[in-house]
Image: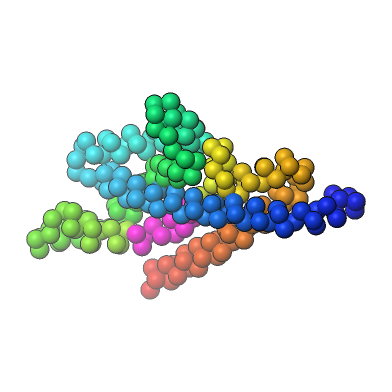
Amino acid sequence: MTAADWPAWITHLPHFLDALLTGAVITVIVTVGGFIGSVVLGILFGAFSTSQSLLLRAVAHIYVEIFRGLPLLTVLFIIFFGLATIGIRLDPISAAITGFSINGGAYLSEVFRAGIQSIHKGQSEAALSVGMTRMMAFRYIILPQSIRVVLPPLANFAIGLLKDTSLASAVAAPEMMFNAGRLVSETFFATEIYLLVAALYLCMSLPLSLATRLLERRMARAHAQ
């Protein structure tokens, strides 16, 4: 940007920040929605993959292999454009949350599977011996302990998800990258606008990174004790 461009840049800055911060709110909404959906599906299919039922294990295996093998952008296009061809129309934000949830659930199911398998089988056997059903043993004994084990990977997943939400712009979700592209087409201040976007992403992701490191250190101390 030359010195002659500074007056126009300063004039446009409030408009840029307003549009980008509005998009940042949508980014957070998509991130939170996608994270919750991913965790729910991750727990469900993680439980399926450790089930004694061959059918449930097969369902979990097929789900994981399919959606870990598909690019996230392809999943978003199938949900937003593909479903519309059979009469199922989702708004861009709902489509983005659904896509991130399905894709993320495939990865988190393996994380939860490892967490569940890290709990000694004797604990579930003890729960069954005192009259609990398998579902009760999973809900009250196994799942709470496995969640503590998988907290650091979950935090790292949340950071990655926050950054991946930029792909939602491909299905017209009005998040930060979508609004940035619109601003660039209006003003041609491409470098300046994308630097603002980078700064906003850092402002959101750095606190998550710090919280993840603190969580990992705390869990390492607890494990050592």
Pinpoint residue 160: horizontal percent, then vertical percent. 52, 50
Q: How many marks?
A: 0
As drawn, which residue projects farthest toward the top?
85
User: Eyeballing the image, is 40 above or below 84?
Assistant: below
Q: Judge left or right: residue 188 versus residue 36.
A: right
Does 165 appear in magenta? no
Pinpoint residue 196: horizontal percent, then vertical percent. 70, 54
Q: Judge left or right: residue 175 versus residue 108.
A: right
Query: Residue at the location (44% across, 59% down)?
Result: 152
Query: Residue at the location (45% across, 70% down)?
Result: 218
Pinpoint residue 127: horizontal percent, then vertical percent. 15, 61
Name the quadrant of the C terminus: bottom left
Does 156 appear in magenta? yes
Q: Judge left or right: residue 136 versus residue 147.
A: left
- Judging depth in this view, the residue of 192 and 83 nearest the camera is 83
Query: Residue at the location (19% across, 43% down)?
Result: 52
- Judging depth in this view, the residue of 74 and 212 nearest the camera is 74
- Judging depth in this view, the residue of 212 and 170 nearest the camera is 170
Query: Residue at the location (34% across, 59% down)?
Result: 147
As drawn, which residue projects farthest toward the right?
4
Q: Which residues are magenta?
A: 147-158
Residue 69 in view of the camera: no
Q: Main secondary structure of the magenta part?
A: helix
Residue 52 in view of the camera: yes
| Occupied quadrant, residue 86 | top left
User: Eyeballing the image, is 156 above or below 105?
Assistant: below
